[in-house]
Image: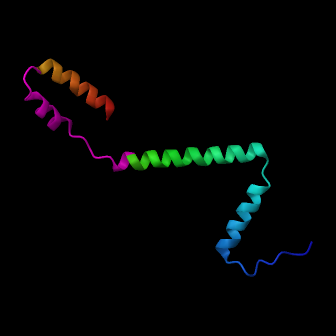
Amino acid sequence: MGKTRSCRRTEDENKIHDKAVKMRKMTDEQLVHYVEDRVEKARSEGFNQGKKAAPAIDIDKILEKIGTIKGIGAVKLQEIRAILEQQK
C-alpha cells in the first residue's frame, strides 16, 4: 500500500483519525476496559457537576420552620438535625 493522503484533513481531523485507528486496533478486552473507564469518568464528572449545582441547605432555617409545628419538641429537632447533617 502507498502512503495515505492526509493533506486534505485538518489537524483536528488527523487527531480524530489517529484516535479512531488506535481504537480499531484494540483487542476486545482493551476496548471493553476503555469504554468502561470512559463511562466511569463521565459518571463521576456528572456527579461532581450535580453536587456543585445543588442548592445549599440552611439547616437552621429548616429546623426553625419545623420547630413551629405543634408536637415537635427539642429532642425531635435534634434528631432531625442529625439526619439533615448526615445527608449533607
12 in relation to 19, above or below? below
58 in relation to 1, above or below? above
Taking the magenta stretch, the answer to whether it contains residue 61 is yes
> Which stretch did the figure color magenta?
51-72
Left/right placement of residue 39 relative to residue 5 reads left
Taking the magenta stretch, the answer to whether it contains residue 12 is no
> Residue 64: where, in percent of width, then height?
11, 33
User: From this viewpoint, which residue is outermost toward the right?
Assistant: 1
71 in relation to 31, above or below? above
> Residue 51: where, in percent of width, then height?
38, 45
* Quadrant, the N terminus: bottom right
Residue at screen point 74% across, 56% down: 23
Q: Quadrant of residue 68?
A: top left
Q: Quadrant of residue 29?
A: top right
> Residue 88: where, in percent of width, then height?
31, 35
Left/right placement of residue 13 relative to residue 58 reads right
Residue at screen point 41% across, 50% down: 49
Residue at screen point 60% across, 49% down: 38
